[in-house]
Image (cartoon, rainbow, N blue to C red):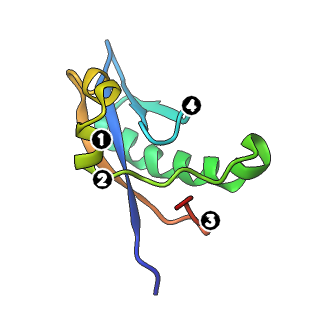
Amino acid sequence: MSAVTYYIALIHETDASYGVSFPDVPGVITGAGTIDEAMRKASEVLEFAAENWLEDTGQEFPRPRTIDELRSDPQFQEDSIDAVIAAVPFRAEVEAAE
Protein backbone atom coordinates (compact mmCIF):
# COMPACT_ATOMS: atom_id res chain seq x y z
CA MET A 1 0.00 0.00 0.00
CA SER A 2 1.45 3.36 -1.00
CA ALA A 3 1.43 6.40 1.22
CA VAL A 4 -0.77 9.34 0.36
CA THR A 5 1.05 12.51 -0.63
CA TYR A 6 -0.37 15.90 0.33
CA TYR A 7 -0.10 19.20 -1.54
CA ILE A 8 -0.66 22.50 0.22
CA ALA A 9 -3.57 24.46 -1.22
CA LEU A 10 -4.56 28.08 -0.76
CA ILE A 11 -8.29 28.71 -0.60
CA HIS A 12 -9.49 32.25 -1.17
CA GLU A 13 -13.07 33.32 -0.66
CA THR A 14 -14.56 35.61 -3.29
CA ASP A 15 -18.03 37.13 -3.42
CA ALA A 16 -19.96 33.89 -3.76
CA SER A 17 -17.36 31.17 -4.20
CA TYR A 18 -14.05 29.69 -3.11
CA GLY A 19 -10.99 29.50 -5.36
CA VAL A 20 -8.23 26.95 -4.80
CA SER A 21 -4.64 27.16 -6.01
CA PHE A 22 -1.50 25.14 -5.34
CA PRO A 23 1.81 26.94 -4.72
CA ASP A 24 3.77 23.89 -5.92
CA VAL A 25 1.70 23.24 -9.04
CA PRO A 26 1.51 26.49 -11.02
CA GLY A 27 -1.56 27.02 -13.16
CA VAL A 28 -3.64 24.33 -11.48
CA ILE A 29 -6.73 25.95 -9.97
CA THR A 30 -10.34 25.12 -9.22
CA GLY A 31 -13.30 26.68 -7.52
CA ALA A 32 -16.72 25.97 -6.08
CA GLY A 33 -19.65 27.52 -4.27
CA THR A 34 -18.78 26.01 -0.88
CA ILE A 35 -15.49 25.33 0.84
CA ASP A 36 -16.34 21.62 1.16
CA GLU A 37 -17.00 21.32 -2.56
CA ALA A 38 -13.82 23.27 -3.31
CA MET A 39 -11.80 20.79 -1.24
CA ARG A 40 -13.31 17.82 -3.09
CA LYS A 41 -12.58 19.45 -6.43
CA ALA A 42 -9.03 20.31 -5.34
CA SER A 43 -8.07 16.66 -5.04
CA GLU A 44 -9.69 15.87 -8.39
CA VAL A 45 -8.00 18.72 -10.26
CA LEU A 46 -4.57 17.71 -8.92
CA GLU A 47 -5.03 14.16 -10.17
CA PHE A 48 -6.35 15.38 -13.52
CA ALA A 49 -3.37 17.74 -13.97
CA ALA A 50 -0.89 14.99 -13.13
CA GLU A 51 -2.22 12.63 -15.80
CA ASN A 52 -0.65 14.53 -18.70
CA TRP A 53 1.75 16.87 -16.89
CA LEU A 54 4.91 15.43 -18.46
CA GLU A 55 3.42 15.52 -21.96
CA ASP A 56 1.98 19.02 -21.49
CA THR A 57 4.96 20.66 -19.78
CA GLY A 58 7.97 18.49 -20.60
CA GLN A 59 8.73 18.30 -16.88
CA GLU A 60 8.09 15.85 -14.06
CA PHE A 61 5.09 16.61 -11.83
CA PRO A 62 6.30 19.00 -9.10
CA ARG A 63 7.05 17.54 -5.70
CA PRO A 64 5.10 18.98 -2.78
CA ARG A 65 7.01 21.19 -0.37
CA THR A 66 6.39 20.97 3.34
CA ILE A 67 4.53 23.77 5.07
CA ASP A 68 7.83 24.82 6.66
CA GLU A 69 9.47 25.09 3.24
CA LEU A 70 6.54 27.09 1.93
CA ARG A 71 6.49 29.45 4.90
CA SER A 72 10.05 30.51 4.09
CA ASP A 73 9.04 31.39 0.50
CA PRO A 74 8.22 35.12 0.16
CA GLN A 75 5.78 34.44 -2.69
CA PHE A 76 3.86 31.96 -0.53
CA GLN A 77 3.80 34.46 2.32
CA GLU A 78 2.21 37.03 0.04
CA ASP A 79 -0.20 34.61 -1.67
CA SER A 80 -1.40 33.13 1.62
CA ILE A 81 -2.59 36.43 3.10
CA ASP A 82 -6.31 36.01 3.88
CA ALA A 83 -6.25 32.41 2.58
CA VAL A 84 -7.25 29.19 4.24
CA ILE A 85 -4.29 26.80 4.02
CA ALA A 86 -5.23 23.16 3.50
CA ALA A 87 -3.45 19.87 2.85
CA VAL A 88 -5.02 18.15 -0.17
CA PRO A 89 -4.52 14.40 -0.65
CA PHE A 90 -2.92 13.33 -3.91
CA ARG A 91 -3.40 9.72 -4.95
CA ALA A 92 -2.45 9.77 -8.64
CA GLU A 93 -0.27 7.05 -10.09
CA VAL A 94 2.49 9.44 -11.21
CA GLU A 95 5.58 10.08 -9.17
CA ALA A 96 6.34 13.64 -8.13
CA ALA A 97 9.79 14.94 -9.03
CA GLU A 98 12.43 14.47 -6.35
34 vs 64, nearest the viewer: 64
Give whichever of discs 2 and 4 has the lower sequence position: 4
Specify the label residue 94 is tagged with.
3
Element type at mark 4 = loop
Decide: few, some or many residues near mark 1? Use Cα within 10 Å; few <14, some 14-19, many ≥20: some
Q: Nearer the viewer, mark 3 or mark 1?
A: 1
Element type at mark 1 = helix
Q: Which residue is the site of mark 2?
A: 66
Element type at mark 2 = loop
In the displayed structure, does residue 44 sit left or right of residue 64? right
Specify the amino acid type for callout 4: Gly
Q: Give the spatial CA distance, label 3 vs label 1.
A: 22 Å
Q: Which residue is the site of mark 1?
A: 70
Q: Is residue 5 above or below residue 54?
A: below
Asked whether the residues under the numbered discs 4 and 1 touch, taking CB atoms below 8 Å apart as contact, a structural biologist would say: no
Specify the label residue 27 is tagged with.
4
Decide: few, some or many residues near mark 3? Use Cα within 10 Å; few <14, some 14-19, many ≥20: some
Q: Position of residue 19 (x, y in %)?
A: 40, 27
Specify the amino acid type for callout 1: Leu
Q: Nearer the viewer, mark 2 or mark 3?
A: 2
Q: Position of residue 37 (x, y in %)?
A: 38, 41
- Tell me which residue sits at (50%, 66%) in the image: 91
In the displayed structure, does residue 74 sit left or right of residue 82? right
Specify the amino acid type for callout 2: Thr
Asked whether the residues under the numbered discs 1 and 2 touch, taking CB atoms below 8 Å apart as contact, a structural biologist would say: yes
Q: Give the spatial CA distance, label 1 vs label 2.
A: 6 Å
